[in-house]
Structures are given as structure tokens and as C-alpha cells.
Image: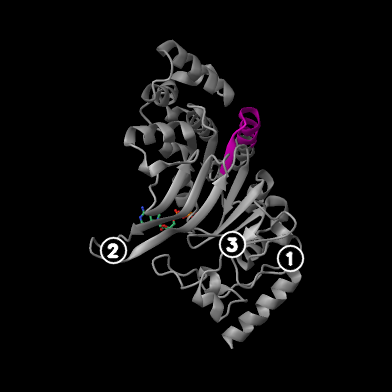
Amino acid sequence: MTDALVQLKNTHVHHRTRTGGLLSRDRVHALTAADLTIAPGETVGVVGESGCGKSTLAKVLVGVQQPTTGTVEFGGRNLWTMPPAERRAAVGTGAGMIFQDPSTALNRRLTVRRILRDPLDVHRRGTPAEREDRVRELMSLVGLPEVLAEGLPGQLSGGQRQRVAIARALALNPRLVVADEPTSALDVSVRAQILNLLLDLKERLGLALVFVSHDIQTVRRMSDRVITMYLGRIVEESPADEVLTRSRHPYTRALFSATPGLLDPIDPIPLVGPVPSATRPPSGCPFRTRCWKADVECAARMPDFEQSGPTAGRGHRFRCHHPVDDGQSNHELVAQAAATAVTLEG
Ligand SMILES: Nc1ncnc2c1ncn2[C@@H]1O[C@H](COP(=O)(O)OP(=O)(O)OP(=O)(O)O)[C@@H](O)[C@H]1O
């Protein structure tokens, strides 16, 4: 696709384990064989259980995490084969990132003005006077009164701090913003304000937004497309309005069924056993050890992506040997999974 802002091709991130030491062959498989395209203007939600690789994917997309293998392309160019100065420029202007906790993401010793000027100074944007104008413009864009320009992060509320972090992410006019759990460290009362601000900025500035969250309801509400991850793998990409009832991967259906209030009234689809270790993921499909549909084929190899439904093309794709039937009800899935759980336990 020529209009891609960012494209991952067979991208892997492995980390050395803390206990493993330099000669150890143990690796955490934080991201495995990710293929993903982010197009201009779209909102992509990323969901999955803790430790499944959501933050790693986010960092790879904004160029702050180098993949172990595979490629990351910004505007069709391989980011990690660019000369370092060019890469820094591409990363600085290509994508902005908003982190979970603004109190740790912002330098506590710098004023709001300095925090927002910093990227403009580093990338030598305009004259000093123009940079000051831009700082004021950024503050107004995110709804921060000018009087806070000389404040330190510690003197601001949590919501104001996150507004500063959002303004900083926007400083260089990126076309993509990646928000990693942008509201989870905030009081419930300001969460909606920050989410609405992000949606408003997305519309006004024509941004693409990648939104990582445990809050599945919010992801569904905010996104055009939802990506489900499991143990470092992207296992499904579905249009947000199909994700509840037409997801084809058993894990996506199980994850959404376990969200309180979302599928009322429905029991969660029961899964067997714990999430396996990311150091030694199962062979084949990583979800097979907990999946009620798994068989020997699932242990033998990871299936390729398959397209689903009438929105075939970019719309809906999944990786599963034994997908849920298109449109199959959650009630049927609960019964199927429960029957398998009983068999396994017996
Ligand atoms: N620097 C690191 N060194 C070693 N392991 C790491 C490192 N960063 C992440 N991991 C591991 O990689 C895996 C994926 O981590 P990641 O933070 O991307 O998951 P996540 O889905 O964002 O989790 P959470 O929802 O809890 O934030 C986890 O097993 C994590 O422990």
C-alpha cells in the first residue's frame, strides 16, 4: 500500500531475559512476525492481556524500539537502515507517542514551556520567536491555559500533565500518534476528557491514532479497526463494529466476552489454563494451549492470515486453523468451550 504511514513486515522483538545472562539463549518473544499497516487518518485499537506485546508494538510503530528482525517502514522507507541522523529526523516528525503515566514521562525539572520547546529546538523548527509561538499554539490546542507555561509537571493535575504530554507528542506535526494506555494512570473523572481531546485532535489535525488499552469498551468505541494480540502475535484485525459478534479468532471472542457490561447478558467464554511463558511460547498457534478448538494442526504450525466476510481486503483478517463461524453466537461458544473444559479436566 503506497499511502501507508507506517508498515511492519515480519517484525520481531526479542529481549534477553533478566536471569538469562549474556550467553543464555533464553529470549522473551515480545513481538513475533508482526505484519501491520497504519494508514493516514485511521484509528487502530490494540487489545490483549497483560504482557502480550501491546507496548512493544506501540514502541516499534513510533521507532523508539528497534526490531530484532524484520522491517519498520516510515512512508515506504526502511527506518532502521537509514543513516542515524536521518532516522532521528524521520522518527521525530513521523510519529508522536503518549505514554501511560505522564508523571514519569515528563521531565520533572523542566517547565511546560521547556518541555514543549525541546523537540522544536532539537529539530531546529523555525526561529526562536516562531518556536515560542508554536509552544503557545500547542498549549491552546490541548486546552492548557497559557498561565501554566512556567509551571513544573509536579504543580499540574494528572489531566493537565497528560495534556502536556499530548502537546509534546504533537509538537512536530506528526501524522501518526500512538497512545499507550493514555488514561489508565488518571482519575476516572478526567479520563473521558482526555479521550475526547484525543478524538477531537485526531479529527482537527487529520491524525492517524493507534490506541493501546486494557479498556476494551473504550477501544471499541474509539477505533475504526481493532487488533487483537496474544503472546506477542497479532492474531486478528477486525473492523471495530464487527469485533463483538463477527470476530473469527476464538481468543478475540473470549477476550471480549470477558468484558463486563459489554455483552450483557452473557457468560465469559471459559478458557483452560494460564497464559504460557513468553520465553517459551508454544509451537504453532500460541493460543492452542487454552483454546477449546485446538488440535494437532494447531501445534504443528501458525496459520497464515485469512480474510473474513464482506469487508475482505484491508478490513478483517485472522490467523486460526479452526475459526469461529462468521456470525456464530457467543452463547454457542460458551457452551462449546465449557464442554471442552470439562473434557480436559476429566
Ligand atoms: N526490556 C525488556 N526486557 C525483558 N522483557 C521485556 C522487556 N520489555 C518487555 N518485556 C517482556 O515482553 C513481553 C511483552 O511486553 P509488553 O510490555 O509489550 O506487553 P503489554 O501487552 O504492553 O503488557 P501490559 O499490558 O502489562 O503493559 C512481556 O513478557 C514483558 O515482560
Left or right of residue 174: residue 312 = right
Q: What amino acid type is highlighted by mark number 2?
A: Thr
In the image, is residue 102 above or below residue 338? Answer: above
| Sequence-first tag of 2 and 1 | 2
Cβ–Cβ below 8 Å for labels 2 and 1?
no
SS for dot 3: loop
Quadrant for ligand 1 reads bottom left
Q: Could you tell me if the residues under marks 2 and 3 are in contact, i.e. CB atoms within 8 Å?
A: no
- The amino acid at mark 1 is Asp
Q: Which residue is mark 1?
A: 326
Q: Identify the mark at residue 263; answer none if there is no mark.
A: none
Does ligand 1 reach within 8 Å of label 1's beta carbon?
no
Which is nearer the eye, 114 or 70?
70
Q: Earlier in the sequence, mark 3 or mark 1?
A: 3
Query: What span is in magenta?
Result: 196-210
Q: What number of labels is visible?
A: 3
Which residue position holds label 3?
305
Q: Position of residue 226 (x, y in %)?
A: 63, 52
How many residues crowd around disc 1 within 10 Å: few (fewer than 14), some, or many (20 or more)?
Answer: few
What residue occupies the far front of the structure in this picture? 2
